[in-house]
């Protein structure tokens, strides 16, 4: 939808989106819209896609996903805090944190 109005995301964002949607770490092929087709619809008075309002259900879904993402971030930070405040097994916690950070990147590279 945004590509139709000339917006192209940063390449890393586009690659991560393709990884999420298509399970491929690659850039999507871009098709440039024809200038005449773009000017022809604007001249006819067709409504601009950017000016259309987002449906309420879609807006609520976005806010729900934002709340879930923030909850995951907060719970992760609290878990790390609890793990490193306790004096026992600190070395094990650091090793597990390193594995948890390196393993997804290694799987992505494969």
Image: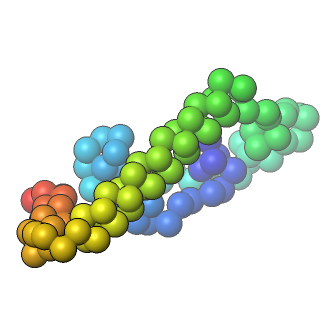
Horizontal side, residue 30 vs residue 61: left or right: left
- Report the label total: 0
Identify which residue is drawn at 65% across, 30% down: 60
Q: Position of residue 88 (x, y in %)?
A: 13, 70
Q: In this view, does 18 lie above or below 59?
A: below
Of 93 and 19, the residue lying toward us: 93
User: Residue 42 at what x, y percent from top left?
Assistant: 84, 42
In front of the other: 25 or 102: 102
Q: Which residue is drawn at 67% across and 33% down?
A: 59
Direction from residue 80 to residue 89 in the image, left or right: left
The quarter of the picture where residue 102 lies is bottom left
Q: In this view, does 82 lie to the left or right of 30?
A: left
Q: Position of residue 1 (x, y in %)?
A: 61, 41
Kindly give the residue lying farthest to the front in the view shown.
Answer: 87
Q: Residue at x 79, y 33 (%)?
A: 53
Query: Which of the 4 image quadrants contains residue 109?
Result: bottom left
Using residue 88 as the reference point, say whether residue 3 is left or right of it: right
Residue 101 horizontal/vertical position (percent): 21, 66
């Amino acid at each position: 939808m945004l590509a139709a109005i000339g917006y192209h995301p940063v390449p890393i964002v586009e690659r991560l989106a393709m990884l999420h949607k298509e399970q491929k770490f690659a850039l999507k092929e871009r098709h440039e819209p024809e200038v005449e087709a773009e000017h022809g619809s604007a001249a006819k008075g067709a409504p601009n896609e950017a000016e259309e309002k987002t449906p309420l259900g879609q807006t609520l879904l976005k806010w729900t996903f934002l709340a879930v993402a923030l909850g995951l971030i907060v719970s992760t930070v609290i878990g790390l805090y609890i793990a490193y405040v306790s004096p026992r097994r600190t070395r094990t916690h650091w090793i597990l944190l390193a594995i948890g950070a390196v393993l997804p990147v290694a799987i992505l590279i494969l």
